[in-house]
Amino acid sequence: MNKRIERINQIIRDLNHLESCAADTLIGTDFIRGVSGLDACTAQNVISCLHKLSRQEHRNINENKDNYLLKYDTSRTYFNEFYYVSKRKLCNVLRNPSLFASQIISFIIYGLFTGLIFNKLDRTVETGVYNRFGENVSGYYRVSSFYFAKLIIDLPLVHIIPSIIYTIITFFLTDLRQSIENFFLFFITNLMAKIFGSSMCYFIAASTSTFGIALVMVICCYVIMMLFSGLLINIESILSFLRWIQWISVFRYASNVLAINEFRNLTLCLPYDTDQCSMKGEEILTRRHISYTTTWDIWKNIFALLLISGTFFIFTYIQLLRIKKFK
């Protein structure tokens, strides 16, 4: 052993300057490439090749590998999976701030547009009533982990924040009844209507893979619900065997809440700056066949919005489970 060590040291001395290289010194830095980089790479390849050869299986084993079934435990906890999928969804939103900013800007523009059109609504019998009703008008993860993570992440970023911005702009520009209760109901109604829109679009998107068909289905649903909302056509004038559609019209429930929120306890005056304020807002609600006497008359409409949205979310989840997985 001593002769071998002596022989190695002799070779190092013969090659000159290798004594300093043999010391614990760094060749190169983080910014300057060392001269021994290629040698280190070659040494790595040699060691890796020797490592593979030393553990190489017999030829007969390799030929019969198709006959073996290797079992591997891929089970994972649901909450751990849900955490990472939610984290990925949030990272995707943060990495694409332009998409989030575009949604905020679009709601600001839409809120300003609505607020300027219905700016400072007057409280007269003719235009005041008309304008107020017009303004109301692969198996990487479980499907449940992806779906619920998307819903939770989208709730504050896609629904709540844009709804708050739109409500603040529209509520004060249109000069609706200024109170905390009225503002809260106006915000809740806008939020629930937006959530319903997302739930219905999710369901249609999960039901068809063709964009054109999905677009037609969305338009048809919105048109039918708008017709049976009571804003464009009086429900009483519709054929009796079609009136049941009003109970699945989200526009009807949303407009009822906004109408009760604005017209209840509101006094309307005659036009042309007269002091005769004899009409009550409750009379308008009665003519529209809208119940307003109790608090439940408001919250039953909000509950209906929540129920319809939840139903679409459940159907979307079922559709996602039914989608065939391609390998």
Image (cartoon, rainbow, N blue to C red):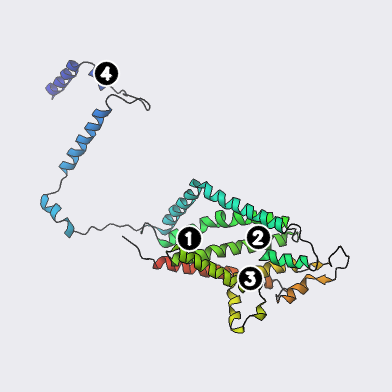
Q: Is residue 283 above or below residue 214?
A: below
Amino acid at dot 2 = Phe
Q: Amino acid at mark 3?
A: Tyr
How many callouts does the rendering have? 4
Q: Quadrant of residue 32?
A: top left
Mark 4 or mark 3, whichever is nearer to me: 3
The span from disc 2 to disc 3 (Cα, nearest Å) is 14 Å
Indicate whether 37 appears above or below 93: above
Residue located 59% across and 51% down the image: 104
Of labels 4 and 2, earlier in sequence is 4
Say if mark 4 contacts mark 3, CB within 8 Å: no
Q: Position of residue 190 (x, y in %)?
A: 63, 62
Q: CA distance from mark 1 to mark 4?
A: 61 Å
Which three-letter amino acid code belongs to the residue tagged 4?
A: Ser
Q: Quadrant of the C terminus?
A: bottom left
- Give the percent coordinates (x, y) of residue 87: 46, 51
Crowding at mark 3 (Cα within 10 Å: few <14, some 14-19, many 20+): many
Residue type for callout 1: Phe
Q: Secondary structure at mark 4?
A: helix
Quarter where residue 286 is shown: bottom right
- Quick one: label 2, few (<14), some, or many (20+) residues within 10 Å? many
**Could you tell which of marks 2 and 3 lies nearer the N-terminus?**
2
- Specify whether residue 78 is in view: yes
Outermost right residue:
275
Residue assigned mark 2:
187
How far apart in space, not on screen, are marks 1 and 2 (Cα)? 24 Å
Residue 185 located left or right of residue 151:
right
- Which residue is the site of mark 3? 253
Q: CA distance from mark 4 to mark 2?
A: 75 Å
Residue 148 disc label: 1
Q: Is residue 264 left or right of residue 14?
A: right
